[in-house]
Image: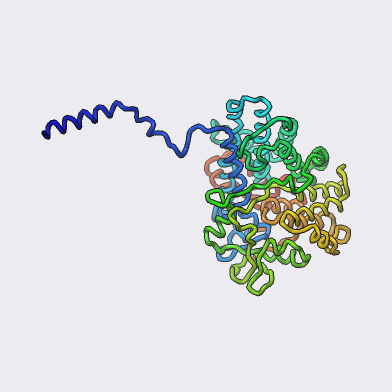
Amino acid sequence: MKKIFFLSAFLYMLGGCNKDLSHLNIDQKNPSEVPSYTLFSNAQKNFANILADANPNDNIFRLLVQQWTQTTYTDESNYDLNTRGVPDQFWGIVYRDCLRDFEEAKNLIPTDVTDAAVQKNQLAIVDINQVYAFSILVNTFGDIPYSQALKPEILFPKYDDAKTIYDDLLSRLDADISALDESAGSFAGGADLLYGGDVVKWKKFANSLKLVMGMILADSDPAKAKSVVESAAAGAFDSNDDNAVFNFLSSPPNTNPVWVNLVQGGRNDYVPANTIINALKALNDPRLEIFFTLDANGDYSGGVPGDGNTFSIFSHVSPSQTAADAPFVLLDYAQVEFTLAEAVERGMSVSGTSEQHYNNAVTASIEAWGGSSAQAATYLGQADVKYSTAPGNFKQKIAMQEYLALYNRGIDAWTLVRRLDYPDLATPTNALSEFPARFTYPILEQNINTSNYTSASNAIGGDAVTTKLFWDKN
């Protein structure tokens, strides 16, 4: 009987060997082929995630502009970029998780989408997103890999001149704006996580991005800035309804990164900086109670930038930012209006007065944060806020209010401060350098892409945090 059993088992095993088991080699959780729209959605989510992030390994911009400061670990508040390798992380995430997925989406759309008009709109929308991501990298590092960056066959891409990249990005935006057909569809369903495939909104977004990018050139290339701003102004955002808002979800893994780091992580690493708290208090700003909680004494107070601040003493970040599903703003109407106010002051041909645009911007910010039009009117009536009587020149007036309006958007506030050199930020307690004008290049680039890194470093005048970008002329 034993012999019969073993023979039967052996024959069964032989029969089993004839079955096709190749399906077991397929990773069901990581498909090798995906529709183009999934790559687009993933890149959008990753891009919003890195801009909204509060992890000190990835995003320290709120600390650099003293919206927040640290408690126990104070390195990043003191301009230490390298202990945690922040430039490496930020660079890697934007290139790998955002730009590459946008590029792959563009490669797949022509075969995925048969309707020519829809295909054209999708390609333009993806490219607008890619332009935005590249502009962030240029404004962070300067010269970067661009023309060869997303070519998989090139392992060691060259670095392109930052101004040349910027001009090309603006040309791409022009082409994308022209390509968008408002009578045709684009992304269906929930694939577009910002505007749900609304082509009209994307055209406004592209013009608004172009407007803001154009103004960044105002001190380095005034003629170019004037041309770009004037051509974009009429098509830009005209209300808060146009704001580019990424809506995170209440359940992981698609939650607000601030919630992930401060609430889910159970960390008490950050308090508001006294820089922004004191500015809001001095101006009786109605956004103060929206941005922050009361401190232990029933008042509003912030920590000293760079100090080892005690978490329990100071105000904290408001639940409006720490909720799991708290949204994140990428670009908004308030920023557009501040840019137009500056455009008028610089002699650019846009409609309206600088005061009108300034008032629109301040009102839009207060209302977008949940304040009322009455609060905005009262605020704008104060001598220190009213455009005609607020202290300083036009750059200082606009920069002060735009800085406040850009709360929680650290990277945009950093660009503002570098560009207009205002508001004046306190020197952190143990600052390792002067105020960072850029991020240094990643260590990995220095070690792996050495020749191209060296050429880029020499071209910009040295790979230091104090090396100013091409547009930073003040």
Q: Which residue appears at 58% of the width and 50% of the height? A: 249
Residue 143 visible in the picture: no
Residue 454, quarter of picture: top right
The answer to whether 409 is drawn above or below residue 33 in the figure is below
Q: Quadrant of the N terminus?
A: top left
Residue 325 visible in the picture: yes
The answer to whether 400 is drawn above or below residue 179 in the figure is below
User: Could you say which is closer to the camera, residue 149 or residue 99?
Assistant: 99
Residue 272: % across, % down: 65, 63
User: Could you say which is closer to the camera, residue 457 or residue 208?
Assistant: 208
User: Could you say which is closer to the camera, residue 137 or residue 196?
Assistant: 196
The answer to whether 424 is drawn above or below residue 443 in the figure is below
Residue 183, quarter of picture: top right
User: Could you say which is closer to the camera, residue 322 or residue 132?
Assistant: 322
**On the rendered structure, is 133 left or right of 286?**
left
Residue 277, quarter of picture: bottom right
How has the structure been colored for display?
A: rainbow
Residue 59: % across, % down: 60, 52
Marker count (numbered) = 0
Residue 372: % across, % down: 77, 58
Residue 423: % across, % down: 75, 59
